[in-house]
């Protein structure tokens, strides 16, 4: 340990204790607010579990609760339908960037942080809280969410151009319909189209086969 970085009786490094005392007695409250914000963020980052899926006893691969995933897909389907009706029935294109941007952010949080921090997954987990979990392999779901991120991201970008140029209507509508179809199959029938594409890519050697084969919904796949 660096010389002088001893700890007091509470286990706090002396230099940190001195900073705390200086901030507490500082005449400028901005320092104190910044200090508190820093500690809140640091605590959140330390406690944050960055992982797509979780390990459970008796399963050698990461899993997700399929009930929550289907409920999350249902929420996203509802949002997608709101954007579709407003944009392509009522000709109100302004709402499309907001919803597609939200969905892209939702996928982004789930993929790079943890699905449980994604807004739709969080709400869905509360809705199906009383139901017994139905665990399935997470790796193919991660690919499906990555596909969702790609499609929603493309819709978001194109919808920004659509606000000023109606010629972007067809590509936005085309991708949006595919997204709605994927979400409908997932929420209504438990059929993950992205997972099917993932298995196909493994068969044609585009993607590497995982070392441990995860299960799918109703054991419907064999990776």
Image: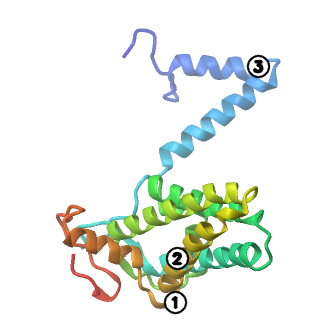
> Which residue is identified by label 1?
188
Is mark 1 in CB contact (under 8 Å) with mark 3? no
Residue 60 higher or lower than 157, as above or below? below
Residue 62 image point, x, y percent: 32, 66
Query: What residue is at 67 percent from the left and 60 percent from the top?
Result: 159
For residue 217, side relative to residue 114 (left or right):
left
- The secondary element bearing badge 1 is classed as helix
> Which residue is identified by label 2?
178
Tell me which label, 1 or 2, sits earlier in the chain.
Answer: 2
Report how far apart the C-alphas of labels 2 and 3 lie in the structure. Answer: 59 Å
Query: What residue is at 59 percent from the left and 62 percent from the top?
Result: 155
Task: Write down the quadrant of residue 145 in the picture.
Answer: bottom left
Residue 112 higher or lower than 121, as above or below? above
The circle on residue 25 is 3
Tell me which label, 2 or 3, sits earlier in the chain.
Answer: 3
Quadrant of the drawing holding the C terminus: bottom left
For the rendered model, the colour scheme is rainbow
Quadrant of the drawing holding the N terminus: top left
Is mark 2 in CB contact (under 8 Å) with mark 3? no
Q: Between 38 and 138, which is closer to the camera in this rendering?
A: 138
């Amino acid at each position: 340990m660096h010389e002088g970085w001893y700890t007091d009786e509470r286990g706090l490094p002396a230099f940190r204790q001195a900073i705390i005392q200086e901030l507490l007695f500082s005449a400028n409250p901005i320092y104190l607010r910044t200090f508190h914000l820093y500690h809140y963020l640091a605590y959140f980052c330390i406690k944050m579990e960055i992982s797509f899926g979780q390990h459970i006893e008796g399963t050698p691969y990461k899993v997700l609760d399929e009930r929550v995933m289907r409920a999350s897909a249902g929420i996203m389907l509802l949002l997608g339908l709101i954007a579709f009706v407003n944009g392509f029935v009522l000709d109100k294109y302004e709402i499309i960037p907001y919803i597609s941007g939200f969905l892209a952010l939702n996928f982004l949080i789930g993929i790079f942080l943890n699905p449980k921090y994604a807004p739709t997954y969080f709400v869905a987990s509360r809705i199906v809280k009383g139901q017994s979990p139905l665990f399935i392999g997470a790796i193919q779901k991660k690919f499906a969410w990555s596909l969702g991120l790609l499609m929603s991201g493309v819709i978001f970008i194109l919808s920004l151009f659509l606000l000023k140029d109606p010629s972007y209507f067809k590509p936005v509508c085309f991708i949006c319909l595919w997204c709605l179809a994927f979400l409908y199959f997932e929420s209504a029938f438990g059929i993950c189209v992205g997972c099917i594409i993932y298995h196909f890519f493994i068969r044609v050697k585009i993607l590497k086969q995982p070392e441990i084969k995860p299960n799918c919904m109703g054991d419907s796949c064999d990776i």
